[in-house]
Amino acid sequence: MEAEIARILGADLPGPACSVADVRAATAFLAPALEIVDSRIAGWDITVVDTVADNASSGLFVLGDTREALGDVEPADVEMQLHRGTELVSRGTGRDCLGDPLGPVRVSFATAANA
Protein backbone atom coordinates (compact mmCIF):
# COMPACT_ATOMS: atom_id res chain seq x y z
CA MET A 1 0.00 0.00 0.00
CA GLU A 2 1.25 3.46 -0.84
CA ALA A 3 -0.01 6.85 0.30
CA GLU A 4 -0.54 9.03 -2.76
CA ILE A 5 -1.75 12.46 -3.82
CA ALA A 6 -4.58 11.89 -6.28
CA ARG A 7 -4.92 14.43 -9.05
CA ILE A 8 -8.50 14.80 -10.22
CA LEU A 9 -8.63 16.30 -13.69
CA GLY A 10 -11.38 18.74 -14.59
CA ALA A 11 -10.33 19.07 -18.24
CA ASP A 12 -8.72 16.89 -20.89
CA LEU A 13 -4.95 16.98 -21.32
CA PRO A 14 -3.88 18.35 -24.73
CA GLY A 15 -1.95 15.26 -25.84
CA PRO A 16 1.30 13.32 -25.43
CA ALA A 17 3.44 16.48 -25.56
CA CYS A 18 1.60 18.06 -22.63
CA SER A 19 3.64 19.93 -20.05
CA VAL A 20 3.45 20.10 -16.28
CA ALA A 21 1.78 23.51 -16.80
CA ASP A 22 -0.89 21.75 -18.92
CA VAL A 23 -1.45 19.20 -16.14
CA ARG A 24 -1.64 22.01 -13.57
CA ALA A 25 -4.23 23.86 -15.68
CA ALA A 26 -6.34 20.69 -16.17
CA THR A 27 -6.28 19.66 -12.47
CA ALA A 28 -9.57 20.39 -10.71
CA PHE A 29 -8.45 19.33 -7.23
CA LEU A 30 -6.21 17.08 -5.16
CA ALA A 31 -7.25 14.37 -2.73
CA PRO A 32 -5.41 11.98 -0.41
CA ALA A 33 -5.40 8.42 -1.68
CA LEU A 34 -4.17 4.95 -0.85
CA GLU A 35 -2.94 2.77 -3.68
CA ILE A 36 -2.95 -1.00 -3.40
CA VAL A 37 -0.05 -2.10 -5.60
CA ASP A 38 -0.57 -5.32 -7.56
CA SER A 39 0.32 -6.85 -10.89
CA ARG A 40 -1.13 -9.42 -13.23
CA ILE A 41 2.41 -10.17 -14.43
CA ALA A 42 3.75 -13.34 -12.78
CA GLY A 43 6.80 -12.81 -10.60
CA TRP A 44 6.80 -9.04 -11.21
CA ASP A 45 9.12 -9.64 -14.19
CA ILE A 46 7.90 -6.51 -15.96
CA THR A 47 9.14 -3.75 -18.24
CA VAL A 48 7.89 -0.16 -18.49
CA VAL A 49 5.54 -1.15 -21.34
CA ASP A 50 4.18 -4.03 -19.21
CA THR A 51 3.66 -1.62 -16.31
CA VAL A 52 1.64 0.77 -18.49
CA ALA A 53 -0.40 -2.13 -19.91
CA ASP A 54 -0.96 -3.34 -16.32
CA ASN A 55 -2.42 0.05 -15.30
CA ALA A 56 0.88 1.02 -13.61
CA SER A 57 0.70 -2.12 -11.44
CA SER A 58 -2.12 -0.56 -9.47
CA GLY A 59 -4.67 -3.04 -8.16
CA LEU A 60 -7.06 -0.72 -6.31
CA PHE A 61 -7.21 2.75 -4.85
CA VAL A 62 -9.19 4.53 -2.19
CA LEU A 63 -9.79 8.29 -2.29
CA GLY A 64 -9.99 10.26 0.95
CA ASP A 65 -12.85 12.67 1.63
CA THR A 66 -10.69 15.82 1.58
CA ARG A 67 -10.61 17.85 -1.64
CA GLU A 68 -8.16 20.72 -2.09
CA ALA A 69 -8.19 23.12 -5.02
CA LEU A 70 -4.81 23.24 -6.71
CA GLY A 71 -4.64 27.00 -6.14
CA ASP A 72 -4.95 26.46 -2.37
CA VAL A 73 -2.06 24.03 -1.96
CA GLU A 74 1.27 23.32 -3.63
CA PRO A 75 1.35 19.56 -4.35
CA ALA A 76 5.14 19.30 -3.96
CA ASP A 77 4.83 20.58 -0.36
CA VAL A 78 2.07 18.19 0.75
CA GLU A 79 3.26 15.71 3.38
CA MET A 80 1.70 12.26 3.49
CA GLN A 81 2.03 9.91 6.45
CA LEU A 82 0.96 6.28 6.54
CA HIS A 83 0.32 4.72 9.94
CA ARG A 84 -0.39 1.14 10.96
CA GLY A 85 -2.24 1.70 14.20
CA THR A 86 0.00 4.16 16.06
CA GLU A 87 3.17 3.15 14.18
CA LEU A 88 4.41 5.50 11.44
CA VAL A 89 5.40 3.18 8.57
CA SER A 90 5.93 5.66 5.73
CA ARG A 91 6.33 9.39 5.28
CA GLY A 92 7.00 11.57 2.28
CA THR A 93 6.16 14.75 0.46
CA GLY A 94 4.81 15.40 -3.00
CA ARG A 95 8.34 16.49 -3.93
CA ASP A 96 9.44 12.85 -3.46
CA CYS A 97 7.40 12.01 -6.56
CA LEU A 98 9.99 12.96 -9.20
CA GLY A 99 10.18 16.50 -7.80
CA ASP A 100 6.54 17.39 -8.49
CA PRO A 101 3.56 15.00 -8.26
CA LEU A 102 2.04 16.65 -11.34
CA GLY A 103 5.00 15.61 -13.51
CA PRO A 104 4.24 11.87 -13.51
CA VAL A 105 0.74 12.58 -14.87
CA ARG A 106 2.43 14.05 -17.95
CA VAL A 107 4.96 11.21 -18.17
CA SER A 108 2.27 8.53 -17.73
CA PHE A 109 0.08 10.15 -20.37
CA ALA A 110 2.96 10.39 -22.85
CA THR A 111 4.12 6.81 -22.15
CA ALA A 112 0.60 5.40 -22.52
CA ALA A 113 0.07 7.31 -25.76
CA ASN A 114 3.32 5.95 -27.19
CA ALA A 115 2.98 2.34 -25.97
Image (tube, helix red, strand yellow):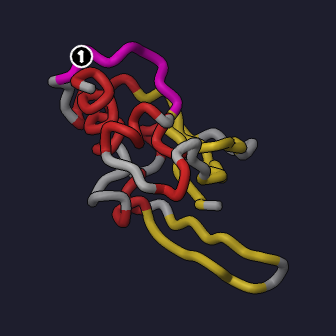
* Mark 1: secondary structure: loop
Residue depicted at 66% across the width and 52% down the height: 36
Q: Quadrant of residue 60?
A: top right
Residue depicted at 58% across the width and 42% down the height: 40
Residue 82 vs residue 87: left or right? Answer: left
Residue 43 vs residue 17: left or right? Answer: right
Residue depicted at 27% across the width and 21% down the height: 113
Where 79 falls versus 71 (above or below)?
A: below
Horizontal and vertical percent for residue 12?
Answer: 38, 14
Q: Quadrant of the C terminus?
A: top left
Where 18 falls versus 69 (above or below)?
A: above
Amino acid type, label 1: Gly
Q: Which residues are magenta?
A: 8-16
Q: Quadrant of the N terminus?
A: bottom right
Frontmost residue, 78 versus 111? 111
Horizontal and vertical percent for residue 77?
Answer: 41, 62
Name the residue that disc number 1 marks.
Answer: 15
Count the labels in the image. 1
